[in-house]
Amino acid sequence: MKTNILFSMLLIAVIFVTSCKEEEEGTPRQITQSHTYSENIRGTTGVKGELPLADLNLTDIIDAEIANNLTNAELQLADSYLEISGLDQVDSPDTVAVVLEDFTIKVGTRAGVNLGDVSTNAQGTNELASDVQHSTNQIISLIQNVFADVTSESKRARITVSFTPNVDITSSENVQLEIHFGGRYHYVERE
């Protein structure tokens, strides 16, 4: 008889612990979200400058509750590109193309990636046309680094650019670095 009572109490305890554990684990969910990181860039004629941009935080992309319960994420490569927009609106002499020489992007503590010269009149192989969405292997690799940092434990990507402009570029001229990507974010919804 004592064995039956002991067994019954043990069974009740196991059921109770199991039901509590299920509540703690929550329900697996996923969300697909696209995001464009857009930051104003500026520079002074002939001066190579390094410009730290605003951090990209996971909560800029998805809701804070989802970000806190994120289990993993997948980058959607088909929806990824980089663009330097607004360069064609910068004041320059009529015959001069606006150029950002040695445009380099650094993500976190990784080495910078030199994309070459960004120009309103790109002609060569080491030139990137402005106001065009680019998704070369080099750029996709850069975007993968941004995505890896923003979905890491820190939930943030630090982005720095450096370049030498051939004309002055002020904040009011609205030249933008745009990094666009899509992602599938897996998280646990807690009751």
Image (cartoon, helix red, strand yellow):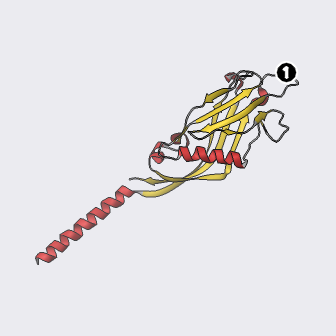
Q: Which quadrant holds residue 114?
A: top right
Q: In the rendered view, tell whether residue 10 sits above or below residue 33.
A: below
Q: Position of residue 125 (x, y in %)?
A: 82, 42
172 lies above or below 185: above
Residue farthest to the left? 2
Three-letter amino acid code at the position of disc 1: Pro
**Quarter-wise, where is residue 95 in the image?**
top right
Residue 4, quarter of the rendered image:
bottom left
Please give left or right for residue 22 compared with residue 123 in the image: left
Instruction: Residue at 75%, 30% (x, y): give it.
Output: 100
* Mark 1 surroundings within 10 Å by alpha-carbon count, few (fewer than 14), some (14 through 19), many (20 or more): few
Instruction: Give the structural element (helix, strand or loop) at label 1.
Output: loop
In this view, the residue farthest toward the bottom is: 1
Residue pictured at 69% horizontal, 41% vertical: 82
| Left or right of 56, for residue 81 | right
Asked if one can make out residue 130 in the rendered structure from this viewpoint, the answer is no
Q: Position of residue 45 (x, y in %)?
A: 74, 21
The residue that mark 1 highlights is 93
The answer to whether residue 145 of the structure is visible from this angle is yes
* Residue 20 drawn at (x, y percent): 31, 59
Viewer-side residue, 162 vs 66 = 162
Q: Position of residue 8 (x, y in %)?
A: 19, 72
Disc tally is 1
Q: Is residue 20 left or right of 68 when viewed as pictured?
A: left
Please tell me which residue lies in front, 108 or 129.
108
Seen from the viewer's position, the closer of residues 87 and 65 is 87
Q: Quadrant of the N terminus?
A: bottom left
